[in-house]
Image (tube, helix red, strand yellow):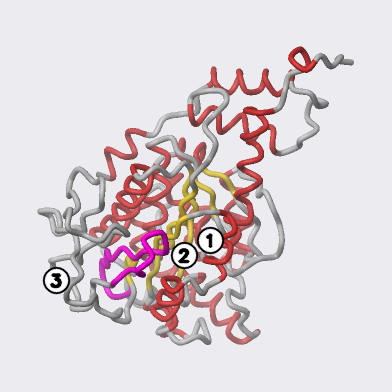
C-alpha cells in the first residue's frame, strides 16, 4: 500500500496553475492585493488539476493518538494516562479541537494508533467492522477490507488480530452519528524508549503509515474536500524534535521546544534526550521509514500516511503544529511532490516547527503563538483556505463587472 500510494503522487498541474494565475489578474482587485491567498489559490488549482479548484468542503479533522516510551526519561510532567483521558474528552466533545471544529463545521475522527492505556470497551451490543485478511483494521471504503454493514453509522474499526492486539481495542462512538468517532488501529501499546532502542520496528512504522493512508482514503471517500491534521500523545514533541533534526539537519537544541510548558531543567533534559537518540541511531533522512522507526512516534508515522494518502488523491491537507510538520517532513522524504498537497495552517511556538516549515518551503497562514496541537491551529486557518478558493469562484472579472482597469 505504501509503495502504490507514493507512486500515485504526481506534481502540480502547471496548466491549471497558469489558468488560476491568469484569472487572479482579471478579478476586480489590484493584482497581488490578496497577498498569500493568491499563490495559495493557484497551488490548490494545480493540486486539483482544474481552475477554479473545488471549495475545500467539507473539512475532516483526523486526530492520531499514541504514547511514547521516551516518556520514561522525564521529558514531560504530564502522566502518560492523559493521552487516553483526552481521547475520552475528544469523543465527549469537550476539547478545544471540538469547539473549533463545531465552529468550522468540520468532522472529528480520533484514531488510536498507539495508545498505551487500554481504552473503555464497547458495549456488548455494538458491532464493529471485520478485519482484513492481513489483520489490519478495515476502514469503510477500503477495498482491502470493506466495513461490516452492521456497524454503527459513525464507524468503528476492529482491533488488530496479531500479537499487538489488546482486549479493550474496540471503543464506542457517541450516540450522535454526527459527533466525534473513534477508529481503533492500535499498532502497539506505545513506542519503545528511543534512547535505549529503536522506537519502532520497520514493520510497525509501516503499519502506522498505512493506517494513516487508509484513514485518508476513508475520509475522502466519505466526501471530505480537505483533511486537517490532529494529534494527541503525552511526550510527543520529543520525537517530533528528533524527526525535525533528522530530516532538516538542525541541531537538537534548535529543534526542541518546551512542549506543554516545561521548566528549564526539564527542557535541558529533553534536548539531551533528543541528542542522545539521534546519536544512538544516526537516522538517514533518505530512508524515511527508517527515521520514523528509529525516533518517531506512531501518531507521527500515521500522520505522514494521512498526508501521503491525501496527496495521492489530490486533496489538500491543512497542517497543524510541530507534530504535523515533523510528519510532513517524513511524507516529503517518501514523495517530494506530496508537498504540493500541504498547506501550513499556522506557525507553532515550538522552534522545530519553523525549521520544518523552512525545509518544506511552506509559509504558515497564521501565527498566534499556539502550541496546543489537536488540530486547533489548522481549524483556525481553515476559513483562510476556503476564502482563497472562494475568490476564484465568486469574484467578478473587470470585464464582467464593467469596471475599468488601470
Q: x and y percent of residue 292 in the render?
A: 37, 59
Look at the image and say whether residue 315 sits in the magenta stretch.
no
Label 1 CA crowd tier, 10 Å (few <14, some 14–19, many 20+): many
Sequence-wise, which precedes: disc 1 or disc 3? 3
Against 274, residue 402 (above or below) is: above
Q: Is residue 355 left or right of residue 188?
A: right
Q: Nearer the viewer, mark 2 or mark 3?
A: 2
To which residue does mark 1 refer?
Answer: 375
How many angstroms separate mark 2 from mark 3 (CA)? 25 Å
Q: Secondary structure at mark 3?
A: loop
How many angstroms separate mark 2 from mark 1 (CA)? 7 Å
Against 404, residue 255 (above or below) is: below
Q: How many marks?
A: 3
Q: x and y percent of residue 214 in the render?
A: 30, 50
Quadrant where the C terminus is found in the figure: top right
The residue nearer to you, when weighing 118 against 383, is: 383
Q: Nearer the viewer, mark 1 or mark 3?
A: 1
Q: Secondary structure at mark 1?
A: loop
Say if mark 2 contacts mark 1, CB within 8 Å: yes
Q: Is residue 370 left or right of residue 399?
A: left
Label 3 CA crowd tier, 10 Å (few <14, some 14–19, many 20+): few
Picture quadrant of residue 164: bottom left
Quadrant where the N terminus is found in the figure: top left
Sequence-wise, which precedes: disc 2 or disc 1? 2
To which residue does mark 2 refer?
Answer: 231
What's drawn in magenta, residue-wise?
Answer: 172-190
Picture quadrant of residue 310: top left
Amino acid at each position: 500500500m505504501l509503495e502504490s500510494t507514493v507512486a500515485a503522487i504526481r506534481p502540480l498541474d502547471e496548466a491549471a496553475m497558469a489558468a488560476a494565475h491568469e484569472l487572479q489578474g482579471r478579478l476586480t482587485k489590484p493584482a497581488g492585493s490578496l497577498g498569500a491567498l493568491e499563490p495559495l489559490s493557484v497551488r490548490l488549482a494545480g493540486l486539483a488539476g482544474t481552475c477554479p479548484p473545488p471549495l475545500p468542503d467539507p473539512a475532516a479533522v483526523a486526530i492520531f493518538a499514541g504514547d511514547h516510551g521516551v516518556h520514561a526519561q522525564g521529558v514531560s510532567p504530564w502522566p502518560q494516562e492523559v493521552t487516553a483521558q483526552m481521547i475520552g474528552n475528544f469523543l465527549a466533545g469537550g476539547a478545544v479541537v471540538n469547539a473549533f471544529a463545531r465552529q468550522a463545521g468540520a468532522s472529528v475522527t480520533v484514531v488510536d494508533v498507539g495508545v498505551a492505556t487500554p481504552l473503555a470497551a464497547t458495549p456488548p451490543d455494538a458491532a464493529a467492522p471485520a478485519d482484513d485478511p492481513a489483520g489490519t483494521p478495515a476502514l469503510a471504503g477500503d477495498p482491502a477490507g470493506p466495513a461490516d454493514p452492521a456497524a454503527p453509522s459513525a464507524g468503528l474499526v476492529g482491533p488488530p488480530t496479531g500479537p499487538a492486539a489488546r482486549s479493550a481495542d474496540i471503543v464506542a462512538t457517541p450516540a450522535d452519528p454526527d459527533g466525534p468517532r473513534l477508529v481503533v488501529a492500535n499498532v502497539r501499546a506505545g513506542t519503545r524508549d528511543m534512547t535505549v532502542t529503536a522506537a519502532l520496528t520497520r514493520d510497525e512504522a509501516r503499519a502506522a503509515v498505512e493506517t494513516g493512508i487508509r484513514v485518508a482514503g476513508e475520509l475522502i471517500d466519505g466526501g471530505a474536500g480537505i483533511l486537517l491534521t490532529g494529534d494527541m500523545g503525552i511526550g510527543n514533541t520529543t520525537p517530533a524534535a528528533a524527526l525535525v533534526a533528522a530530516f532538516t539537519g538542525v541541531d537538537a537544541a534548535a529543534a526542541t521546544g518546551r512542549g506543554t510548558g516545561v521548566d528549564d531543567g526539564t527542557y535541558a533534559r529533553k534536548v539531551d534526550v533528543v541528542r542522545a537518540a539521534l546519536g544512538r541511531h544516526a537516522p538517514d533522512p533518505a530512508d524515511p521509514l527508517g527515521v520514523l522507526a528509529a525516533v518517531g512516534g506512531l501518531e507521527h508515522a500515521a500522520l505522514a500516511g494521512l498526508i501521503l494518502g491525501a496527496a495521492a488523491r489530490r486533496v489538500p491537507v491543512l497542517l497543524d503544529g510541530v507534530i504535523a510538520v515533523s510528519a510532513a517532513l517524513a511524507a516529503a522524504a517518501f514523495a517530494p511532490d506530496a508537498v504540493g498537497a500541504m498547506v501550513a495552517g499556522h506557525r507553532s511556538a515550538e522552534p522545530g516547527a519553523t525549521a520544518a516549515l523552512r525545509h518544506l518551503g511552506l509559509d504558515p497562514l497564521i501565527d498566534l503563538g499556539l502550541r496546543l496541537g489537536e488540530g486547533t491551529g489548522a481549524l483556525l486557518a481553515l476559513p483562510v483556505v476556503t476564502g482563497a478558493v472562494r475568490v476564484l469562484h465568486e469574484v467578478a472579472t473587470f470585464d464582467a463587472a464593467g469596471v475599468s482597469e488601470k
